């Protein structure tokens, strides 16, 4: 029992180490960024699971917004193909039948003295494998969904998208023989 708990903890910690976090500073006030982040998540069809902000002793605000798991795709015939667009790598399970694909957004906001608001964004992908394991599996996002959410946040804040949304990494060129 203890050994299986240790393995489960190791697996969870391994995922967290590979999750890509987007971090940027927005030149806006905390209440406006807070409202816009919530609006952008809801516009993507996700409900909010948790939202809380606090004020520190210096009067600066910080907060956490976490969405519920949002189903991106349902159906054995299309779940894998759709989730591959957003994934670094879907878990390899021989003979797997993916029943759905989901995303959960986690946004941390922290008001800075004069620079605006620091935003940190992570998206966690998951899906139900319904044939071999009959369990939900979690894996890392490739950044596409995060960039889409950041683009909408930039639009709502009326900021230049190219200054806010990080460029995707360039595809490495294949060597010719």
Image (cartoon, rainbow, N blue to C red):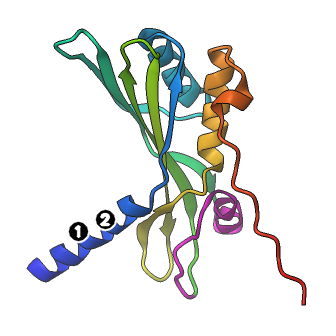
Q: Quadrant of residue 74?
A: bottom right
Q: Is residue 133 above or below residue 9?
A: below
Q: Position of residue 112 (x, y in %)?
A: 38, 18
Q: Are marks 2 and 1 in contact (CB under 8 Å)?
A: yes
Provide the major secondary structure of the magenta segment. Answer: loop
Identify the image quadrant of the C terminus: bottom right
What residue does disc 1 label? 9
Q: Position of residue 118 (x, y in %)?
A: 44, 27
Q: Is residue 33 above or below residue 21?
A: above
Q: Is residue 125 magenta?
A: no
Q: Judge left or right: residue 130 versus residue 169.
A: left
Residue at (46, 10) in percent of width and height: 29
Of residues 19 and 126, the one drawn nearer to the viewer in this rendering: 19
User: Which element type, helix, strand or loop, lies under badge 1?
Assistant: helix
Q: Is residue 82 above or below residue 61?
A: below
Q: Position of residue 37 (x, y in %)?
A: 51, 24
Q: Quadrant of residue 88?
A: bottom right
Residue at (66, 38) in percent of width and height: 148
Regarding residue 142, the answer to whether it shows in the image is yes
Residue at (64, 56) in percent of width and height: 86
User: Which element type, helix, strand or loop, lies under badge 2?
Assistant: helix
Question: Which residues, given as a range, are shown in magenta?
Answer: 75-94
CA separation, marks 2 and 1?
Answer: 5 Å
Identify the image quadrant of the N terminus: bottom left
What residue does disc 2 label? 12
Q: Judge left or right: residue 177 versus residue 8.
A: right
Q: Residue furthest right?
A: 177
Q: Residue furthest left?
A: 2
Of residues 137 and 62, the one drawn nearer to the viewer in this rendering: 62
Of residues 164 and 8, the one drawn nearer to the viewer in this rendering: 164
Q: Quadrant of residue 92?
A: bottom right
């Amino acid at each position: 029992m203890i050994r299986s708990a240790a393995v489960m903890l190791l697996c969870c910690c391994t995922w967290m180490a590979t999750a890509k976090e987007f971090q940027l500073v927005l030149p806006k006030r905390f209440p406006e960024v807070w409202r816009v982040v919530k609006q952008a998540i809801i516009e993507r069809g996700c409900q909010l699971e948790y939202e809380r902000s606090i004020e520190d002793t210096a009067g600066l605000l910080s907060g956490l917004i976490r969405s519920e798991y949002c189903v991106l795709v349902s159906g054995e015939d299309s779940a894998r193909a759709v989730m591959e667009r957003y994934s670094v790598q879907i878990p390899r399970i021989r003979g797997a039948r993916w029943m759905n694909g989901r995303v959960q957004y986690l946004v941390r906001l922290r008001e800075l003295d004069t620079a605006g608001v620091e935003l940190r964004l992570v998206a966690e992908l998951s899906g139900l494998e319904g044939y071999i394991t009959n369990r939900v599996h979690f894996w890392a996002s490739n950044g596409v969904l995060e960039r889409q959410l950041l683009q909408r946040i930039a639009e709502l804040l009326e900021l230049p998208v190219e200054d806010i949304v990080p460029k995707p990494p360039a595809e490495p060129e294949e060597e010719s023989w």
